[in-house]
Image (cartoon, helix red, strand yellow):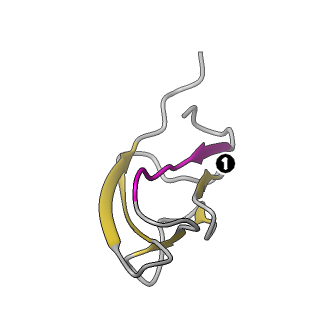
Amino acid sequence: MVAGASTAIPLSAVGGTKPYTWKPTASTLPTGVTLSTSGTLTVGRTLPSGTSTVTVVVGDAAGARATRTFSLQPLPPL
């Protein structure tokens, strides 16, 4: 990710029973970050400097769940 640029990051899951549904584990995501239920993490142009942490949970049609934590750190433009 480059600071000041919007980035879409597709998340994926393996196994389980499709369809998968994604959501953040916290009630709010860091400023400038959204997560679609289909698993696209979008980091907007307003992500704060430094490292932001996002924890997401994916659920499948059979009720199984998995949780992962990601660290997001914007890089300065080249």
Which image quadrant: the N terminus? top right
Q: Which residue is drawn at 44% across and 84% down?
A: 27
- Residue 25 is situated, as x and y percent measured from the top left of the image, at 37, 76
The magenta segment: 7-15
Which residue type does callout 1 highlight? Arg
Q: Which residue has dot 1 on it? A: 45
In the image: residue 8, left or right of residue 11: right
Which image quadrant: the C terminus? top right
- Residue 60 is situated, as x and y percent measured from the top left of the image, at 46, 72
Location of residue 9 by image quarter: top right
In the image, residue 62 sits, relative to residue 46, either above or below, namely: below
- Residue 21 is situated, as x and y percent measured from the top left of the image, at 54, 72
Location of residue 15 by image quarter: bottom left
In the image: residue 62, left or right of residue 9: left
Between 33 and 57, which is closer to the camera in this rendering? Answer: 57
Q: Which residue is drawn at 68% across and 38% down?
A: 5
Between 40 and 75, which is closer to the camera in this rendering? Answer: 40
Q: Does the magenta stretch include residue 8?
A: yes
Q: What element carries label 1?
A: loop
